[in-house]
Amino acid sequence: MAVSRVPLIAGNWKMNLDHLQAIATVQKLAWTLKDANHDFDAKGSEVAVFPPFTDLRSVQTLVSADKLDVVYGAQDVSEHDSGAYTGEISGAFLKALECTYVIIGHSERRTLHGETDEQLARKVAAAIRHGLVPVLCVGETAEDLEQHGPSAVPVAQLRAALEGLSGSPDIVVAYEPVWAIGSGQAATPEQAEQVAAKLRETLAELFGQETADATRILYGGSVKASNIASLMREPNVDGALVGGASLDVAEFASIARFQKHVGT
Ligand code: PEP
């Protein structure tokens, strides 16, 4: 991993942990990392959690009152800013809760909620409009992998979601092969690196080398404390989006502290 990019270890809680459980979990996570003298910068990693919407106010209150180093974001955002969109959450509301990030285009939203590339591009634009950093998820299914090879689908999804953006957008890209999510079968470091390198090449083509070099590309899919160090050794892998393992504080803290077990 290039030294100039602060690694990001992000926990996607999905539809788990209510607001009371969220308070206990974030508190325990912050204390675990503090006890271990975790560096929340390039020497260690930035640590982010993505709780359900209903937890965000509680997490905000805790993080701000106790001045915790953990940052947080939402799992989705509306493409609209306000109006008659029952059930949708505006980026403005997330910003008001001091969210740093928002996940956009998780494979579960693409498949279970039928979110299209065009809609995701509008969500990315909405996030940026409200000063949130999109964590844009891209990734191929097992069938895509067989038919099109490893990077064609993720690269096409990246191009589509960033359509219309210019300048140097502040985004995070999460490469999450669908076949690796929740399957217990993570991509190999070489597989993750191969696609991450292609994604960075595409970012360079779209926004220039400087922006591409500054953009963090995460790997997601069955990341655990036992495989994070080898993934993080790859030059284009700048962190991880962690699902299941982020619900276990000790495991997630150990993932965040991957620098301590590089070489294992
Ligand atoms: C995810 O949900 O984004 C994910 C990567 O899940 P898991 O770590 O459980 O595979």
Image (cartoon, rainbow, N blue to C red):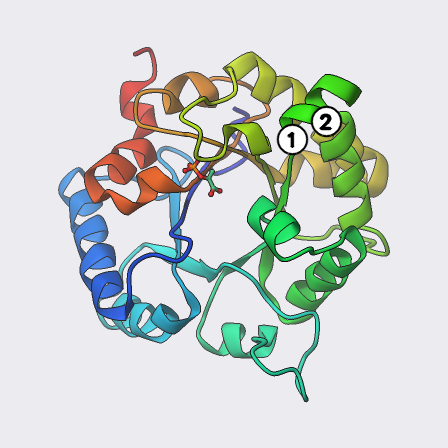
Q: Quadrant of residue 217?
A: top right
In this rendering, position of residue 231 left or right of residue 140: left
In this rendering, position of residue 169 left or right of residue 25: right
Which residue: 46% across, 36% down? Answer: 7
Which residue: 32% across, 38% down? Answer: 245
Crowding at dot 1, Cα within 10 Å, few <14 / some 14-19 / many 20+, comes out as: some
Which residue: 48% across, 32% down? Answer: 221
In this rendering, position of residue 190 left or right of residue 38: right
Q: Which residue lies most toward the left here? A: 35
| Cβ at disc 1 under 8 Å from ligand 1 | no
Q: How far from the left and from the top, in percent, is residue 240?
A: 46, 35
Q: Which mark is residue 144?
A: 2
The relative height of residue 200 versus residue 63 in the rendered view (above or below) is above
Q: How far from the left and from the top, in percent, is residue 46?
A: 40, 44
Residue 105 visible in the snapshot? no
Q: Dividing the image into four quarters, tell me where ligand 1 lies.
A: top left
- Secondary structure beneath label 2: helix
Q: Quadrant of residue 257?
A: top left
Q: What residue type is labelled 2?
A: Asp
The relative height of residue 170 versus residue 202 in the rendered view (above or below) is below
Q: Which amino acid does label 1 sit on?
A: Thr
Crowding at dot 2, Cα within 10 Å, few <14 / some 14-19 / many 20+, comes out as: some
Q: How far from the left and from the top, in percent, is residue 185?
A: 45, 22
Q: Distance from label 1 to label 2 (Cα)?
A: 5 Å
Which residue: 77% across, 51% down? Answer: 117
The relative height of residue 15 versus residue 234 in the rendered view (above or below) is below
In this rendering, position of residue 227 left or right of residue 38: right
- Secondary structure beneath label 1: loop
Q: How far from the left and from the top, in percent, is residue 224?
A: 34, 28
Q: Are marks 1 and 2 in contact (CB under 8 Å)?
A: yes
Q: Residue 105 carries which label?
A: none
Q: Disc 1 designates what residue?
A: 141
